[in-house]
């Protein structure tokens, strides 16, 4: 649990670190953490590799992994799911693209909240569909959906699917039970299937905030799919393992058929890592949340002392959505890079006046980042 430990990733072909290789720029963009995995995960992977045979494993037959998922959801989210509701996928990105293909026909329309992370914004076009943007608005110091726009767009008979991100990436809000009920009512009223990407659902930082899975909302059992993974929470994204929870057998069959012949099985190491994460790593998990909460509070305090920058305190994720409009410049991304920081460009998410910073890193990185910004 040495979250302060700095691990050199410069020569490991890390996606995050390769972007600014050879430059004096701290990479704080793509959403993987700088933390060493929990030891039980590493030990489980070592044991599998030492066995010596890395042949085919059909994910649907990996009962320990599915049982680990159901137990985790029951303990952490008070959600009772059946084993046959679980569909393994190699990531949530292919999963919501599968949903777009499964539940829409070319020319149909798909609701997507904005700002949002680039793969979700791109998903409708990937399937020859039209994207309808649902804005995110600030209400009482918190980001939430523009429900009036959601209702108006959902009325379109060509609108068949809402791909939702909760907790929201990049703004970090966790939708309340009342907000989810409102989403559910709108979707049911207009015959819109709900696909909820909840990959950050186990990174709730604010005490008293509760994540409610979409499939747990009354009325959504037959018209929703919920996407989750251990990848962000336990820093195993490179192993390509995620899962969809689809209670309705018809929706589940359509979803599986959409990936036939194109979507590979989740590999055996991804299955094993997910099982270990959900069954043996509670102490590491709780300690990481405490560390991330402290990092968030430090960043909120420091960013809001810098003229021209503004950061709302988010409920979840390790991603800070920083408003740089007060700088009065056209390209905040270039400004941050000139200061020696490499955030995610807000333009990629839908608003060029923002940047997104990943604070899942040793405190020393954050302190250096703030030092550079203030210089």
Image (spheres, rainbow, N blue to C red):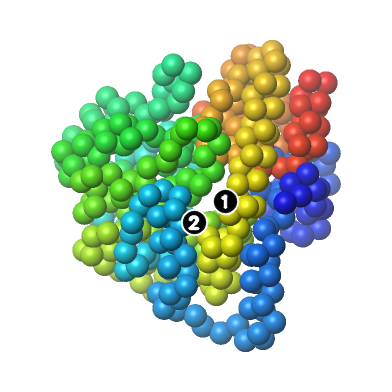
Residue drawn at the location 72% of the way across and 51% of the way down = 1
**Contact? badges 2 and 1 (CB < 8 Å):** yes
Asked where in the image residue 331 lies, by quadrant, the reply is top right
Which residue position holds label 2?
Answer: 229
Residue 339, given in percent of the width and then of the height, sits at: 78, 28
Residue drawn at the location 64% of the way across and 31% of the way down = 296
**218 or 271: nearer the viewer:** 218
Up-down: is 292 above or below 313? below
Residue drawn at the location 74% of the way across and 59% of the way down = 13
| SS state under label 1 | helix
Q: Is residue 1 left or right of residue 73?
A: right
Residue drawn at the location 32% of the way across and 32% of the way down = 179
Residue 89, given in percent of the width and then of the height, sits at: 44, 64
Which residue position holds label 1?
Answer: 232
Label 2 Cα neighbours within 10 Å, binned few <14 / some 14-19 / many ≥20: many
Residue 246, given in percent of the width and then of the height, sits at: 31, 59
Position of the C terminus by quadrant? top right
Residue 180, given in percent of the width and then of the height, sits at: 31, 36
**71 or 361: nearer the viewer:** 71
| SS state under label 2 | loop
Up-down: is 134 above or below 7? above
Whether residue 114 is visible to the viewer of this picture, yes or no, is yes
Q: Is residue 118 left or right of residue 16?
A: left
Disc 2 from disc 1: Cα separation: 7 Å
Asked where in the image residue 14 lies, by quadrant, the reply is bottom right
């Amino acid at each position: 649990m040495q979250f302060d430990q700095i691990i050199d990733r410069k020569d490991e072909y890390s996606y995050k670190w390769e972007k600014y290789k050879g430059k004096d720029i701290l990479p704080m963009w793509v959403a993987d953490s700088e933390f060493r995995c929990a030891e039980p995960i590493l030990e489980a992977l070592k044991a599998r590799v030492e066995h010596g045979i890395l042949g085919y494993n059909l994910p649907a037959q990996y009962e320990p992994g599915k049982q680990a998922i159901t137990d985790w959801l029951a303990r952490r989210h008070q959600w009772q799911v059946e084993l046959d509701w679980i569909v393994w996928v190699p990531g949530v990105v292919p999963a919501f693209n599968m949903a777009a293909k499964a539940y829409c026909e070319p020319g149909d329309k798909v609701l997507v909240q904005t700002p949002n992370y680039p793969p979700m914004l791109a998903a409708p076009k990937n399937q020859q569909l039209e994207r309808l943007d649902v804005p995110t608005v600030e209400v009482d110091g918190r980001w939430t959906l523009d429900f009036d726009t959601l209702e108006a767009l959902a009325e379109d008979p060509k609108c068949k699917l809402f791909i939702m991100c909760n907790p929201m990436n990049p703004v970090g809000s966790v939708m309340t039970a009342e907000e989810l009920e409102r989403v559910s009512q709108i979707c049911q009223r207009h015959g819109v299937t709900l696909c909820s990407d909840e990959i950050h659902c186990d990174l709730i930082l604010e005490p008293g905030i509760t994540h409610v899975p979409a499939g747990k909302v009354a009325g959504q059992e037959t018209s929703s799919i919920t996407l989750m993974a251990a990848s962000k929470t336990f820093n195993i994204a490179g192993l390509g393992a995620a899962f969809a929870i689809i209670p309705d057998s018809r929706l589940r069959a359509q979803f599986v058929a959409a990936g036939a012949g194109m979507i590979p099985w989740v590999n055996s190491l991804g299955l094993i890592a997910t099982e270990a994460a959900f069954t043996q790593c509670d102490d590491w998990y709780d300690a990481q949340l405490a560390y991330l909460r402290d990092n968030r509070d430090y960043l909120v305090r420091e960013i809001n002392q810098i003229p021209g920058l503004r950061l709302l305190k988010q409920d979840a994720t390790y991603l800070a959505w920083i408003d740089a409009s007060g700088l009065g410049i056209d390209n905040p991304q270039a400004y941050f890079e000139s200061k020696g920081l490499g955030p995610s460009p807000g333009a990629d998410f839908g608003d060029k006046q923002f940047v997104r910073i990943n604070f899942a890193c040793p405190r020393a990185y954050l302190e250096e980042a703030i030092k550079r910004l203030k210089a």
